[in-house]
Amino acid sequence: MRNIAIFAHVDAGKTTVSEQLLSHAGAIRVRGAVDAGTAHTDRLPVERRRGISVQASCAHFSWRGEEINLIDTPGHSDFAAEVERALWAPDGAVLIVSAAEGVQPQTEVLFRALQKAQLPTLLFFNKTDREGADADRAIQEFRALLSPAAAFLDSPEEMMALAAEENDQAAEDYLNGVIYPPSKLFPLLQQAMAQGRAYPALRGSALKDEGIPALLDAIIDLLPPPKASKDGRLCAILYAASQDALLGRGVHVRVFSGALQNRDAVTVGENQHKITQIRFWTPDGRGQDTGRLNAGEIGVVYGLGDLPVGTVLGDGALLPRPMELGALREPLLSAQVTPLEKGREQEVRRALMELSGEDPLLSAAFNEETRETTIRAMGKMQLEIIDETLKSRFSLPCVFSPPKLIYRETVESPCEGFVAYTMPKPCWAVIKVLIEPLPRGSGVEFRSVVAPRDIALRYQHQVEKAIPLALRQGMLGWQVTDVRITLTGGNHHEIHTHPLDFIVATPMAVMDGLRRGGTKLLEPILEAHITVPKSAGGRVMGDINRMRGQMLSSSQAGSLLRIRAELPAATSLDYSETLLQFTGGRGGMSARLIGYRDAPDTVQETMPRRGVNPLDTAKYILAARSALDGGIFDF
């Protein structure tokens, strides 16, 4: 068996490659087309209407007697969260690179993510039929920007050179002019690929049906099968979710250890769920009943209720690698969602909470005072898709507020925060923290210098666990980052301290410190790749300065100029549309979030608080004890 996923920058031809793979394997009779809305891996109505992939989808087929689960992922950066979760399921990957455009911003993001996930990866340089395409130039660019360990599989000498880096005998033979046959060469390449030190590449044109059989062979010859699990304990992860008209909500599951089967009772937290049906995906999207998923297999499980994507079934310690949300890309925009018909606010809330179960980064939050639900999104395209989904799936036409950029904030100077949560009884949690600013991009650090006799270790762990809760909205209403929080003092009580007291108290202590130290605004910064005719270069460079940006590099490719720049998101979100207008459609821009920096004093943005402010301690304690609507954990 092979579990593989296909990744690519948008419009690199990823879904067309998937269609050709299914066709050559005999899994489909007629190849679908993205533009016609007939691609077999684009199954949602919105995907077929728009001709883009929104959800990761799986198809099962066979080649040379081996079973293959193929996961086709979205290419548009607005759906990076879906791509990130798809990284949890496979054992190997195919990264599509356009031979015409070369390495694009999302290509680099995906490659770094594949490296971090330690997934052996094949490269396929697609669109060799395009005018101006040059696979040799594109792989040189890949070597320069991403990894020098990339070589075309149709060059035995280049492949032997990669193998020589891994094996002393192979190095000696290579120096003596010996080239190994595939039977001896491929095992060495597999070892190198597993260590991220070899990236075999192929070239072709999915549109012209060139290079596809060679890619299928390489998937079997070079990408690994699932590792055999010797542990009988269950370990599986929910990496996606979908709706079936008859069976309801199904969760896409990769099993790493143990097995799942129909009628199994699965316990998550304090709740137990009973599996009603298990399917694996067929290319037509209908699925086929299988009744059981063994270690190494991927399928769709029904009966697990509303368990959110990212839930681990069984023993999470058996996961082969870290699987976290938001590592690939974080949401950049927020918007308020209001139903067109008054009185349907709770329906909107429930619908968006359901969608948040499928994409936890949406972070749907309901404001009891305004009766509005706020969501987060990667970009305007994702908001448009959510709008269509609310109409088509939930029959809820809604109005979206103009999207607002998501900022961050950080503490201005070192400060101390304190809280004594000792009333009303029964409770006891006394906390003193030191909050210090860190360099940009540092994130959040926590440490403790308190002795266990003052605060028991289990309660110190509660303080650490509550830090993300405490920092999700600072004095300006934005998430707080680039800080070190040190637990410096406090105490527990042998009798009066209850299990969650320190989780409730931590946000009050942290906000007390932020109030004392004050916070400053951080704005999101994008790395932009801009391509325009050379005649438009002067205009673009002037625009970069006007947008408070910085040009990093420029290069020429024929009649085109490629510019790499760092730009504040606040000034550049709509610049791609401007480029299209003044270049007559010949210019374009793609961008990715690279971090947050101090915003100019002229930029003053705040976010309304969601939930009760921990500085209002009396009301906050009531919310924590569920005496008010919308507890402290509800957003």
Image (tube, helix red, strand yellow):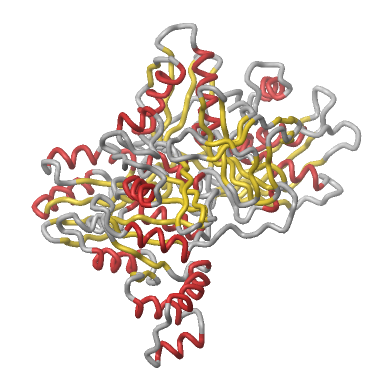
Q: How many marks?
A: 0
In the image: residue 348, left or right of residue 35: right
- Looking at the image, which is closer to me, 146 or 528? 146
> For the N terminus, which image quadrant?
bottom right
Which of the 4 image quadrants contains residue 339?
Answer: top left
- Extreme residue toward the bottom, this view: 176
- Looking at the image, which is closer to me, 86 or 399? 86
In the image: residue 135, left or right of residue 322: left
- Looking at the image, which is closer to me, 23 or 453? 23
Determine the residue positioned at 36% across, 52% down: 24
Up-down relation of residue 283 to residue 328 (above or below)? above
In the image: residue 493, left or right of residue 301: right
Residue 526 visible here: no
Up-down relation of residue 383 to residue 68 (above or below)? above
Determine the residue positioned at 47% across, 76% down: 183
Residue 483 placed where, x, y %? 57, 48
Residue 117 placed where, x, y %? 52, 56
Residue 10 placed where, x, y %? 32, 46
Residue 624 visible here: yes
- Looking at the image, which is closer to me, 65 or 351? 65
Determine the residue positioned at 38% across, 29% down: 385
Determine the residue positioned at 63% across, 27% down: 305
- Extreme residue toward the left, this view: 535
> For the C terminus, which image quadrant?
top right
Residue 138 placed where, x, y %? 27, 63
